[in-house]
Amino acid sequence: MKGTKISIYDTTMRDGAQGEGVNFTVKDKILYLQMMYNSGIDYIEAGWPGSNPKDDELFRMIAAKEIALPAKDKAKRSARIAAFGSTCKVNESPEKSEILSKLIAAGTDTVTIVGKAWKLHVTEVLRASLEENLRIIRDSVNFLVQAGKEVIFDAEHFFDGWLEDPDYAMRCVEAAMLGGAKGITLCDTNGGTYSRDISRGVEAVKKTFDPQILGIHAHNDGGLAVANSLAAVEAGANQIQGCLNGMGERCGNANLSTLIPWLQLKLGYEVMEPEALRNLTRFSRYVAELVNYPFDSKQPFVGRSAFAHKAGMHVDAVLKDKRTFEHIDPSLVGNERRILVSDQSGKANICERLRRFQPDLEKDDPLVEEAMRRIKEEENQGYQFETAEGSLDLLCLEILGKFDPPFELLDCHVWSDPLRGELDSVAVIKVKVKDQCVHVAAEGDGPVNALDKALRNTLSAFFPVIEKSQLVDYKVRVLDGSQGTDAVVRVVVETRHGLDSWGTIGISSNILRASSKALLDALYVVILKDQGVIPKSVVNHN
């Protein structure tokens, strides 16, 4: 119902960390807690005490109050930190359960425990009787409640169990309610349930028990985690469990970066304050950077491509009325519109890009025609500016007569001996900054690495911001393989500074020359962004 409060339970640090290629250190988890504490998220699941040394150390610090969390902000909703675990073991009393005792000692007011709700798991995995499973659910929840904890029960495989034997799945939920659980989370653990059945299962639980918190925990194995979470809310669930960027085991968990704006901006539910929602893009990109996990640029709402426009007619229309090709205002989620420029571009694309540096420029200005000619000519040679927006900005500045190179590469020599070992190359460069010339040599693992090190070592003394930037991707593409080793290659370098990233490009039949062009452009952009000549991304803020 429109206006209803929907609680967000963030399991990025626990279930998200179970995804392939995702790894949080203790420091990463602390940074994540500090960032998300006043983010508007209601619950943050920090991990599973007792499951690994990292989580043990984290919860020791939480219990000892050694983690400096931001002061609670009356204007923002502070999160409740949750510890995750499971019920006691089969034929074990809660009082003797090491799992439950560690949950109590974890120092969190909220505890979430998982228990079986599918007969298959009870008989084949736990190897227990159906009644014993009900007993350990009820007694485990009650033990934690008696210890003063707010308990949320995750009914694992609820929908598979409910479709196979609805009576027993409901008895599992009942056992948790009898134990005193404040919340019941219905889990589509295998991620293969259809939205219609999700709705029916949620409605059945709400009609029979109506817990204070009725949550949904959906996996994305069938590609429906977001749709199934929305279906659950429409059927009566009032809490969403999920992960930023959809991280998680196998195909991932429900994507909070997509769900939150859908719930609030599209369906009218109350999820978080508008100011908090405007940080969503930054949060999504930050966590990807934190764990060095590839960020999906085509991700809805928060991706770099979510509001990127390339076709000339699209750009012309969206500049006249953004509703024509943007389903929401990108600023509502902290994202930004991007006008891509290529040989397919019209004047509207190119004029909008040039306006970044000369806001009063009109579409019929001769400079727009000149920019169009230059861009189409260079793309015909092999340049590709939609993947190299840094080089595009430098070209725009040059066309407008506003490019003042912060340094000049006067001389460059690179020697390489592939038989020498790991450090097989040496680069010697001569750079001029204002009226000062500097010679520097650097060794590297390959000629491009040596050149990159030499440039950075030289220029960091003049422009300290370079030390805070990093080269995160280097791609080489042969444009015409029929020319053999004489073929023209395209080198694209991706550079990141904070949450801001951009590509730069070089074209040549000499791979080192193409690489040096891309590297030089990358460093020009780092410096000019720091100087305010080139605008920074809107998500590059604290």
Image (cartoon, rainbow, N blue to C red):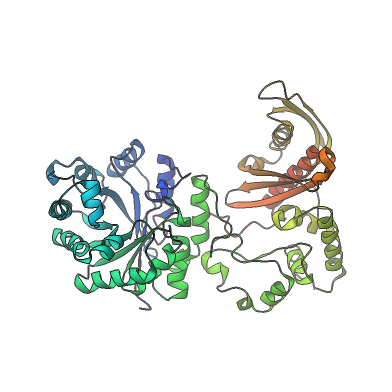
Q: Left or right of 406: which side holds 97?
A: left
Between 449 and 524, the one nearer to me in the picture: 449
Residue 173 in view in this figure: yes
Could you tell me which quadrant the N terminus lies in?
A: bottom left
Q: Is 294 in front, or is 192?
A: 192
Q: Give residue 461's quadrant in the image.
A: top right
The answer to whether residue 272 shows anywhere in this view is: no
Query: Whole-percent x and y of residue 396?
Result: 79, 59
Q: Quadrant of residue 417?
A: top right
The image shows residue 306, relative to residue 472, as above or below, that is below
The residue lying toward the viewer, choosing from 405 and 222, is 222
* Residue occupying image coordinates x 86% and y 68%: 369
Query: Image check: 109 left or right of 317?
Result: left
Image x and y of residue 424, in percent:
71, 25
Residue 26 x %, y %: 40, 40
Question: Residue 409's spot in the image, x, y percent?
Answer: 82, 39
Picture residue at 41% right of the left edge, 52% below the top: 12
